Each structure stands twice: as structure tokens, then as C-alpha cells.
Amino acid sequence: MSSDRDVAAFDRRAASYDEGRLGAWHEDIVLKVSAVVQRAAPEVVHAVVDVGCGTGLLLAQLRARLGAQVRLLGIDPAPGMVAQAARRAQGRFDVAVGAAEALPIPDGSVDVAVACLSFDHWADQEAGLKECARVLRPGGTLVVADLFAAWLGVTTIAGRSRRRVRTPRVMQSLCVRAGLEPLVWQQLQRAGFLPIIQVIVADRPVPDWMRTR
């Protein structure tokens, strides 16, 4: 998912990640994203994967919103984060070490894939989106919340060690190339008058041959 440097940084921060002002900000975004997932999820949900689950805060919220019958799985490349998430889980959800670009999940096995503030850290964002599409069942839903705004295009100029996707236009193009159908954007947080954290909801389309069965 992330570079080794990113993973090491998250490992160091894992024990205190949910503390302080940054922790409170992260919790606020998680609460908003969990509400988006609840609204956008297919009518029947059996399994959800949180890609870049961190300390498991979103998984705990989804457990409360979606009910005990839904299987919840968190994937994160930082072992320290996974350890913190496992402590929070207390049997309510499962977590494992893994990367967005190689999800340890069978094809078409989840109804919802969600990435909350992790997408910006994926080493290969296009590959990660293709993996999300692969593990989603036809008709399944992807929810990605992160730094997305047209004005953030200035932060993706050439010359960086790794170019990040931060504009809605490019994100929608990547979703389409991954075989996903972008549905809606929703603003979650502004910086003054400027949007900064937005969420995109996209579906894995149902093939025509399945519609006619």
C-alpha cells in the first residue's frame, strides 16, 4: 500500500495515533465516512473490507451501523496499526497485514470496500483501485475518502518522488480504468472556502448477462 518509509512512520505512530487534535480530527472524518458507507451500501451486505484500516476506528463504527451479521475485515500494511486494531476489535471484526495493491481476499467476495484517509498513501493508486474492483462483487460499492479537490492539482506536479491523485477529475478517470462506475462525490471538510476532504462513491457494474438471469 505505502512505501516502506510510510509504513515505518505509521508503525511508530500506531500507539498514539488516536490521541490529541489529530486523533480527534481523524475520528470526525471516520464518523462522517461511516455514515456515507451506511447510506451507499447495497441493500444486502454480507462483507466489508476497510483498506488501510489503521487502528480499526472505522471498523468499530461500521460494526455499530451495519449490525453483527456483516463480516468486517481490515487490511493495513503497518503491523503496529494492525496490532492496535486487533486490540480494539475484541472479536467484532478481523484484521490482517496487507497492501491495497495485493489484497488477500478472493475475487468478488465483498459487498463494500472502503478507504478512509489511506488512499493518498497507496504506492500504486491505480493498482489499488483495480484490486478493490476485483474483490467487489458485481453491484458492490467502493467508498474512498481523502484529499480530493481541483485546487490540490498544484500539489501533484511533476518532480515529486511519487505523484498522488488528488483531483476529482483524475480520480474518476482511474475508477473507470479500474472497471468502476463513479456515482457521486460528497464534501466532508473544507479549509476555509476550499474543499479539502471529499468522498467518492463508485460501483462495480453488474454485467448484462447477470441482469438478464
Image (tube, rainbow, N blue to C red):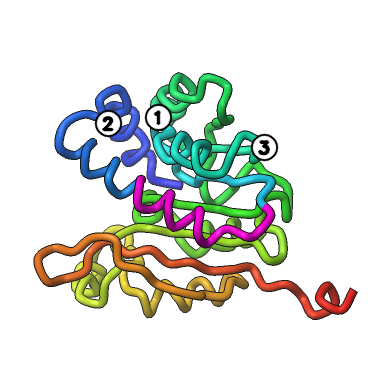
Residue 177, position as x, y percentages in the image: 56, 75
Please name the residue shown 48% across and 38% down the image. Answer: 59
- Label 3 packing within 10 angstroms: few (<14), some (14-19), many (20+): few
* Viewer-side label of 2, 3: 3
Q: Amino acid at mark 1?
A: Met
**First-in-chain label (2 vs 1):** 2
The residue that label 1 is drawn on is: 81
Q: Answer yes or no: do the residues labelled 2 and 1 have beta carbons within 8 Å?
A: yes
Residue 17, disc: 2
Residue 42, position as x, y percentages in the image: 63, 60
The residue that label 3 is drawn on is: 69
**First-in-chain label (2 vs 3):** 2
Residue 58 sits in quarter: top left
Residue at mark 1 to residue at mark 3: CA–CA distance: 25 Å
Please name the residue shown 55% across and 31% down the image. Answer: 95
- The kind of secondary structure element at disc 2 is loop
- Label 2 packing within 10 angstroms: few (<14), some (14-19), many (20+): some
Tell me which segment is drawn in magenta: 31-44
- Label 1 packing within 10 angstroms: few (<14), some (14-19), many (20+): many
Residue 184, position as x, y percentages in the image: 45, 74
**First-in-chain label (1 vs 3):** 3
Looking at the image, residue 37 sits to the left or right of residue 9; the answer is right
Residue at mark 2 to residue at mark 1: CA–CA distance: 9 Å
Classified by dominant secondary structure, the portion drawn in magenta counts as helix
Please name the residue shown 29% across and 41% down the image. Answer: 27
